[in-house]
Amino acid sequence: MVIAKFDHSANEIANDDIEGYPTIRFYPKGGLPMVKYQGQRDLTSLLKFLAEHSIAYGEMKAKESMHWNEDL
């Protein structure tokens, strides 16, 4: 998973309307359609969004959970 800052004023993306800043977009692996993030601008909301849309994030959380349980 890559999280990147992108300067829209210096780079154009076809068919993408920017309503304000920061604008957050999720581009799934495998050429799946882009998903617009419209949640709150806090870490908890962003992590919930990733859990719903990102396979990589879900796999990472599952591994963390397994390691945590092994430590008990």
Image (cartoon, rainbow, N blue to C red):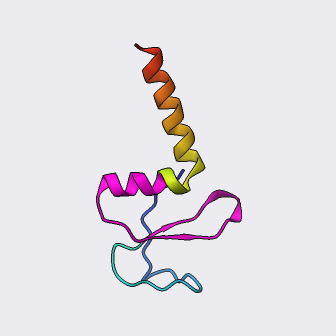
The residue closer to the viewer here, 5 or 37, is 37
Residue sitting at x 43%, y 83%: 18
Q: Nearer the viewer, residue 23 or 40?
A: 40
Q: Which residues are magenta?
A: 24-50
Tell me what residue is drawn at x 61 percent, y 60 percent.
28
x and y percent of residue 25 in the render? 48, 69
Q: Does residue 1 lie above or below 41 as drawn?
A: above
- 69 sits left or right of 28 in the view: left
Q: How many marks?
A: 0
Does the segment drawn in magenta span residue 45? Answer: yes
Residue drawn at the location 29% of the way across and 58% of the way down: 42
Relative to 53, 46 lies left or right:
left
Looking at this rendering, what residue extends furthest in the right direction? 30
Check the image and name the residue furthest to the left: 42
The x, y position of residue 58, in whole percent, is 54, 43
**Where 35 falls versus 49 (above or below)?**
below
